[in-house]
Every structure is written in structure tokens, then in C-alpha cells.
Image (cartoon, coloured by chain):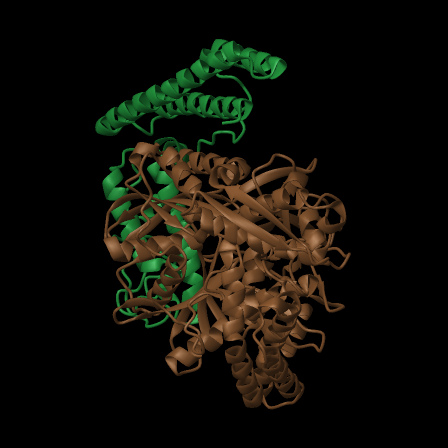
């Protein structure tokens, strides 16, 4: 287990040095996390936009084996409670970091840039697509499942999925380049990252609307 | 330390298992060797209670006072019962947690369930030769918070410390994983008596990670029976349709017809009517399948959504595991194949696999099975009601548990002394369309509107159960949280029931023996009298006299307090009537009765 940020480096139960691990190397008791521990640190990772999926899963499994409440069932109440909160943090870290979009969004937050949760402003580059899609959805609602319009909506759906996939791949390529060049946290790249994430988030929510409309 | 048992608390049947040195095993009824305990609880006029097979048999005679599928009522309110439920049971007309009315008194579903759990506890103690105080209990993956709390309450009332609630399909995957040691994506399709679940899991290096789950807590084999029963009832004269005994009898026949039709192409049912007549009818498999097809199709919709939630295609699934007795129905198997593109794995006993998995989980918790670990998810999104009666999600469905969410609240008016939080579970936009779980009242230090800062943490533990804690950010002090469960028991109710349940548990063993012997005696007495009247022509000379003497002897014993005497008289009557019973069967055209004792005819 890599070093993480715990509140204290001394085990609350057996007083040995924990080296900042999620659990005590001596008595296996889960340690309280520092309030400012970030999700990368919880899984022993550097704050990087680029993460290897297999490595992430291995770290997640190892951390789960260490802190999951099932492993501390017979321990005292404090260890049990810490197991639940540490496990919740480990689960949140994995859920956030395995998805490139959620990871980038979280990474931006760590750099002080927040994406509005419900950004209702249509990104300019997507205005036409959004307009067409909403028009088709209204038509579909009006005629109640007419075959031809339904087919068009299915085509829009496929197009949206492809765009999201493409945007995500491009984003991955871009951030990998930034990381190589060591420029990922400059004001210009932060702004660029924010723009790209807004577009992808918007496309995702549009896809959600389409799914709701066609009852998928 | 004493062993921890795993319990499958099913809609129709329940089982108890334990992890031994050679793997998990089901613990049978010490008296009969039966492995399945019907989840039936019968309330007798004298205040006594019978559980299992005896209660099931009582259902025909005392339908209102015999609870056959209490699981359907766990953690729900009066507004969730169906018109069919109302025909079958009586409910107290009040808000909050549902209450059944049996023998003129109110009982809560957890109390009824506790009788089933207590019986399984007894089986386990007899098999293990030591007291059992701790258990893992399985619940449908799609159970919401209230339904889970109710199950845990039932465990407590039965004198069990419930170490963990495990989702049924996930428990099944543990049994499957121990058996096959495959790695990859596994879909568990679990169609029981009253609930349907599907879970998509990733198995890797001993970690069982649930990727997505879906289900319907009101869909199961019972609904198949009900559809068939409706068909049969519709063909009866109107005045008989609403007759509770006819209703119960028709349901029983429908269930047996369903079993037969899993192998046979058709089956005959014969209903004995209260007026002495009977109705015969042939049911074909095709007819049965057309009745249940819409229900089975619903499971397909749920499976496809779960795959989508997991971000997978059907072709990614390595194996489909069939769980629950209802997966024996051929149409259900075809549905599984249609959704996942491969035939389901059926070599594990679908009735036992969940209990065996619960036994394994008990081993995981106590260190007996260290290499396996289950990472499960919350089945429904959890959130709060916000301005404009809107549902705001805090934890999305299919989030791995334990899971936490933190929100900061403030006050709307000056000198407000508390903040009220309404927690709900579901996927709909409007708060009122989701299931209300509880209201939490949290005190705040008074101040101008918008100034107090209350940080509230919503934590879902490994059981899928929510707890709420709060801290005042200005003072850093923890704040107490008062919980008003929407469909659960309050702490005071729970306390009162616990006291009563201890009284019940200490009841004399002898009294229990007498009670059980009496129920058996009544069953055979009623059956014998009915058959004597109905089939007098089949009696040999002197036979009637001998049977009537045995009946009389049993009646006298039954009214006494000596259970050994009741059992002996029961055996005498049973032996005396055996040739008569055989003749009735020979003369009968009913295919469903073969090999059944007289009392079941």
C-alpha cells in the first residue's frame, strides 16, 4: 500500500508508525483519513490526468481488501466505523478516477476550477446539434412513436454516442500530451480542459434526454 | 465463538446454511430432514402460532390468519398493498408501517418474519448442537432502505444479531464462484417466489464486484400462480369466486400446475367445490406461457437496463447463473437465453444457492474465508427533497457501498431552531414519485437566516442501510439526528416487540410440541371425516367402524395435553386409513394427487 494522507501517522489503536497507510501495518486497524486527503492519494496515486486502468483496479482491490467493513466485522466499534468511512472514500476514489471525464472534472476542481453541476448554457460549438436534437425529440413526443421519426432519433442517439466517444479520446490524447510537456496546469490548458469537459458533459446530458424520450 | 449462520429469508421458502470445513451446507429440519421451510406463519384462535408446512396447510381453512408471503409486506405502507393483497389479507387502516390483522390483533411484517427466522434458528441449533446468536440474512438486491431495515428488525426480534444483509444474487455469485473459480463477467438472474433481481458482476482475483443491479420487488413465481388462478377462477360461478377457501384452494392448484408444466405439456386440475361438486380443467403449457409472457418480458427489460448501467453488451457476459425456483419455468429460461445470448447455468440448485452463499458470506465475516470479498452496490438512487418538491440525488444507483455524500444546509428564516430533511429513494424527478424513507430533524444554533451552516453526512453502509450524521460547521459540534421512518418501526415499538418476543422464546418446549401435534391431528381428522363422507362407497365391511374408532381416539388425545399420546393416536389413524386412501387414489382421475397422503387430498 502506497502512502496516503491520514490524519495522524501513529496508529490510534496500537500506537505503531503507520507511514500514512489506510490501515495500520501492525494491527490492521483502519486509520482516519485527513480531511484534506484527495482521491488520488486515497489510492496512492500522484495527481495525474493520465491513469492506467489495470493499475487503478489493482490498487482499488488491494485497498478494498484492507479497509472493507467485511474485514473488520469482529473488531471494536471504532475500527468498524472507520472501516465504513475509509471504504466509502476508496469507493468514491475508484468511481471518480476510472471515468476519464469524472477524473478530469475532479482534477480541475483540485486546481480551483469548478464546472457548474447543471450548466444550462449550450456550448457554442454544439448549438446547431442541440437545436436539431431537441426539435426531433419534440416531433417524436407529438406523433407518439411514428416509425420514421423514431429511426431518426435512433440515428441521433448513435451520433451522440460516437461524438462523446470521439471527444473523450481526443481529450485523453490532449491531456497525455500536456502531461508529457508539463503544462497541464497552466491557465490556458485549464481553460481549454474546462471547455472540452463542458462540451462532453453537455453531450452526455443530451444523450440522457434522448434516452428518456425514447424510453430506453 | 459460536458459528454464524447464513439465512435465505425467501418469499415462499426459507433456508439456513453454514460454512463448514468442506464448504457451505444447508442445515435441515431436525425432525423431518426437510431443507426448505415454507415461509408461512399461521395464527391460531387460541393465540398459538405455527410456522412452515403446518401453516401452509392451514391456509385453505384459515386464509386470513395465515400469512404466506410476508416478504411482500416488509418495509411498506398501506398505500403499497394491491387489491389482490386486500382480498387475501386484512390490514389495519393506518399510516406508516403496514400492519396485518390476524385473529383480531395487529402484527407487523417484521414480527411475522421473526417467527420464520426463529424456526430456522431452532433448526440450526439442533444441527450444530450449540446456540446460534448471529446471522447473515439475504435480501433482494432491489430492496430499498425501509425493506432492509424491516428485515434487520425481524432478525433482532428473532434473537439474532444480524451481522450483514447480503443481496440474494450476490450471495448466489459467491456460491457459484467458490464452485467454478471462473474470472470475468457473470450475470445472476434471480426469480424467486415474490421478487426478481438481476446483478451483473465482475469476478477477478477473489473480488466479486457488482457493476450494476436491477429488479422488481413485486414480481415472482407467486404472480405466475396468481395469473393462472385468475384464469381458473374466472370460469367458476360468480358466487364462488370471492369465497376465501375456494380462492386459497385454486391458488394451491395453480402452483402445482405450474410445477407440473415445467416438465409436462399439459396438466389436469380438479377443484372440489364447497357445495360438494367439482370442476375439472386441462391447462396446457402454451396457455400458461401466454398468461405469464408479459411478466417474463418485464424481467428482460430489467436485464437490459442493468447491462446498460454496467456499460456492457450481452456478448461481454461469460456466464448466466439461474437462481430461484421460478427459473425452472421453461419460458423463463428462454427469456434468459434471449437476453444474454446463451443458455443459463442450471447445475447449482436454484433453491439452495442463495442460502449457501449467505453461509459463505458468514465465513468471510468471521475470517473463515479470507480470500473472497464482495463489493456490492446500492440498487436505487438516494436523495433529498429540495425546493419545489424536487428530488435531488446525492448517491446514484449502482454506486459501490459503503458510500457517503456530504451536503451543507442553512436556514430559511431568522432564528430557525432546526433543519428538516426528507430522504427518499428512487429514480424519478419529483420527490413524491420516489419512495419516502425517513424525515430527519436536526437542531441548529439559532441565527439570522442563511447564516447557520449545517454539514450533513449521508452514509450507506455495507448492508445498504442509510444513516445520517450532522455537524454544526460554525461550532464544529456534532448534532443529534432525530429519525422518523416513513414505513419502519420506531425505537419504542421495537423495544416493546423485543420484550414480547423474549416472552415468546421462553415458552415451554412441551407446549410447542402439544401445539404442533394438535395441528397435525386436526388436519388428519378433518381430512378423514371429509373422505368418509365423500367416498363411503369405497369402504370395506368393518373398515368404517375401525376408522371411526381411531378418529375418536385421536380426538380424545388431541383435546388432552399429552403430545406423545396425540402422536401415537395420529399414527394409528394414519395406518388405519392407509388402504382406504389408496383406494380413493386408484379411483381418482386426478393426476396431481399421486403419492400424496390422505390428509392432502
Horizontal arrangement in the rendering, residue A87 relative to residue B544 (left or right):
left
Horizontal arrangement in the rendering, residue A164 relative to residue A173 (left or right):
right
What residue is rendered at 65% in x and 89% in y? B560
What residue is rendered at 65% in x and 65% in y? B534
Q: Is residue B61 above or below residue A141?
A: below
Pick the quarter of the image with the N terminus of chain B: bottom left
Horizontal arrangement in the rendering, residue B2 relative to residue B509 (left or right):
left
What residue is rendered at 50% in x and 9% in y? A148
Q: Is residue A22 visible?
A: no
Judge by depth and name the residue closer to the eye, A110 or B43: B43
Q: Position of residue B463 (x, y in %)?
A: 47, 58
Q: Position of residue A12 (x, y in %)?
A: 37, 68
Judge by depth and name the residue closer to the eye, B196 or A124: B196
Pick the quarter of the image with the C terminus of chain B: bottom right
Horizontal arrangement in the rendering, residue A22 relative to residue B118 (left or right):
left
Q: Position of residue B439 (x, y in %)?
A: 67, 53
As drawn, the chain in brown is B
As drawn, the chain in green is A
Q: How many marks?
A: 0
* Occupied quadrant, residue B112: bottom right
Judge by depth and name the residue closer to the eye, B204 or A34: B204
Q: Position of residue B13 (x, y in %)?
A: 49, 61
What residue is rendered at 59% in x and 11% in y? A139
Q: Is residue B195 above or below residue B289?
A: below
Q: Is residue B523 above or below residue B189?
A: below
Amino acid at each position: 500500500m502506497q502512502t496516503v494522507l491520514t490524519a495522524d501517522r501513529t496508529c490510534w489503536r496500537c500506537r505503531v508508525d503507520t507511514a500514512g497507510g489506510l490501515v495500520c501495518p501492525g494491527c490492521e486497524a483502519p486509520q482516519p483519513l485527513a480531511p484534506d486527503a484527495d482521491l488520488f492519494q486515497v489510492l496512492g496515486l500522484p495527481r495525474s490526468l493520465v491513469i492506467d486502468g489495470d493499475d487503478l483496479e489493482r490498487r482499488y482491490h488491494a485497498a478494498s481488501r484492507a479497509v472493507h467493513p467485511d474485514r473488520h466485522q469482529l473488531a471494536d466499534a471504532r475500527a468498524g466505523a472507520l472501516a465504513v468511512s475509509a471504504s466509502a472514500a476508496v469507493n468514491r476514489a475508484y468511481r471518480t478516477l476510472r471515468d476519464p471525464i469524472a477524473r478530469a472534472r475532479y482534477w480541475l476542481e483540485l486546481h480551483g476550477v469548478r464546472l457548474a453541476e447543471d450548466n444550462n448554457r449550450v456550448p457554442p460549438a454544439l448549438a446547431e446539434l442541440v437545436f436539431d436534437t431537441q426539435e426531433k425529440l419534440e416531433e417524436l413526443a407529438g406523433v407518439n412513436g411514428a416509425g420514421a421519426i423514431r429511426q431518426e432519433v435512433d440515428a441521433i442517439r448513435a451520433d451522440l454516442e460516437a461524438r462523446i466517444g470521439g471527444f473523450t479520446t481526443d481529450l485523453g490524447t490532449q491531456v497525455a500530451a500536456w502531461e508529457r510537456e508539463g503544462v497541464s496546469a497552466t491557465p490556458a490548458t485549464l481553460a481549454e480542459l474546462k471547455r472540452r469537459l463542458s462540451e462532453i458533459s453537455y453531450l452526455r446530458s443530451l444523450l440522457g434526454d434522448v434516452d428518456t424520450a425514447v424510453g430506453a | 465463538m459460536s458459528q454464524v449462520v447464513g439465512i435465505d429469508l425467501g418469499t415462499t421458502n426459507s433456508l439456513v446454511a453454514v460454512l463448514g470445513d468442506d464448504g457451505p451446507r444447508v442445515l435441515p429440519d431436525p425432525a423431518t430432514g426437510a431443507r426448505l421451510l415454507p415461509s408461512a406463519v399461521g395464527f391460531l384462535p387460541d393465540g398459538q402460532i405455527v410456522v412452515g408446512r403446518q401453516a401452509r396447510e392451514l391456509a385453505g381453512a384459515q386464509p386470513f390468519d395465515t400469512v404466506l408471503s410476508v416478504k411482500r409486506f416488509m418495509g411498506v405502507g398501506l398505500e403499497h398493498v394491491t387489491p389482490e393483497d386486500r382480498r387475501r389479507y386484512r390490514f389495519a387502516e393506518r399510516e406508516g408501517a403496514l400492519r396485518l390483522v390476524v385473529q383480531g390483533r395487529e402484527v407487523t411484517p417484521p414480527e411475522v418474519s421473526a417467527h420464520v427466522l426463529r424456526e430456522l434458528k431452532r433448526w440450526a441449533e439442533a444441527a450444530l448442537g450449540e446456540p446460534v446468536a448471529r446471522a447473515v440474512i439475504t435480501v433482494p438486491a432491489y430492496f430499498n432502505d425501509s425493506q432492509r431495515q424491516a428485515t434487520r428488525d425481524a432478525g433482532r426480534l428473532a434473537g439474532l444479531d444480524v451481522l450483514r444483509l447480503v443481496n440474494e444474487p450476490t450471495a448466489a455469485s459467491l456460491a457459484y464462484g467458490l464452485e467454478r473459480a471462473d474470472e470475468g463477467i457473470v450475470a445472476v438472474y434471480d426469480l424467486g417466489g415474490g421478487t426478481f433481481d438481476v446483478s451483473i458482476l465482475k469476478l477477478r482475483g477473489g473480488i466479486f464486484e457488482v457493476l450494476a443491479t436491477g429488479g422488481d420487488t413485486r414480481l415472482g413465481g407467486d404472480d405466475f400462480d396468481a395469473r393462472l388462478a385468475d384464469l381458473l377462477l374466472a370460469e367458476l360461478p360468480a358466487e364462488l369466486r370471492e369465497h376465501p377457501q375456494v380462492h386459497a384452494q385454486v391458488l394451491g392448484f395453480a402452483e402445482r400446475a405450474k410445477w407440473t408444466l415445467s416438465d409436462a405439456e399439459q396438466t389436469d386440475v380438479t377443484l372440489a367445490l364447497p357445495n360438494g361438486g367439482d370442476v375439472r380443467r386441462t391447462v396446457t403449457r402454451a396457455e400458461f406461457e401466454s398468461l405469464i409472457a408479459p411478466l417474463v418480458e418485464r424481467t428482460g427489460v430489467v436485464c437490459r437496463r442493468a447491462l446498460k448501467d454496467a456499460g456492457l453488451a450481452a456478448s461481454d457476459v461469460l456466464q448466466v447463473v439461474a437462481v430461484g425456483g421460478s427459473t425452472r419455468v421453461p419460458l423463463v429460461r428462454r427469456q434468459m437465453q434471449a437476453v444474454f445470448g446463451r443458455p443459463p447455468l442450471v447445475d447449482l440448485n436454484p433453491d439452495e444457492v442463495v442460502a449457501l452463499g449467505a453461509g459463505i458470506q458468514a465465513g468471510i465475516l468471521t475470517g473463515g474465508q479470507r480470500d473472497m470479498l464482495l463489493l456490492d452496490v446500492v440498487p436505487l438512487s438516494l436523495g433529498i427533497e429540495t425546493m419545489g418538491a424536487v428530488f435531488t440525488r446525492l448517491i446514484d444507483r449502482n454506486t459501490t457501498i459503503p458510500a457517503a455524500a456530504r451536503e451543507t444546509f442553512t436556514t430559511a428564516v431568522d432564528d430557525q431552531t432546526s433543519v428538516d430533511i426528507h430522504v427518499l429513494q428512487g429514480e424519478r424527478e419529483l420527490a413524491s414519485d420516489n419512495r419516502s424513507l425517513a424525515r430527519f430533524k436536526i437542531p441548529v444554533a439559532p441565527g439570522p437566516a442563511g447564516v447557520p451552516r449545517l454539514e450533513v453526512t449521508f452514509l450507506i453502509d455495507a448492508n445498504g442501510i442509510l444513516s445520517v450524521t450532522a455537524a454544526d460547521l460554525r461550532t464544529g459540534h456534532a448534532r443529534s439526528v432525530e429519525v422518523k421512518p416513513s414505513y419502519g418501526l420506531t425505537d419504542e415499538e421495537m423495544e416493546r416487540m423485543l420484550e414480547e418476543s423474549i416472552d415468546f422464546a421462553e415458552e415451554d418446549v412441551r407446549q410447542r410440541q402439544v401445539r404442533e401435534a394438535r395441528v397435525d391431528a386436526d388436519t388428519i381428522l378433518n381430512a378423514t371425516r371429509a373422505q368418509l363422507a365423500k367416498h363411503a362407497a369405497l369402504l370395506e365391511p368393518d373398515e368404517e367402524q375401525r376408522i371411526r374408532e381411531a378418529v375418536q381416539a385421536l380426538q380424545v388425545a388431541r383435546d388432552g395435553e399429552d403430545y406423545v399420546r396425540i402422536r401415537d393416536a395420529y399414527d394409528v389413524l394414519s395406518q388405519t386409513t392407509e388402504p382406504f386412501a389408496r383406494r380413493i387414489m386408484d379411483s381418482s382421475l386426478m393426476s396431481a394427487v399421486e403419492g400424496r397422503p390422505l390428509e392432502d387430498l
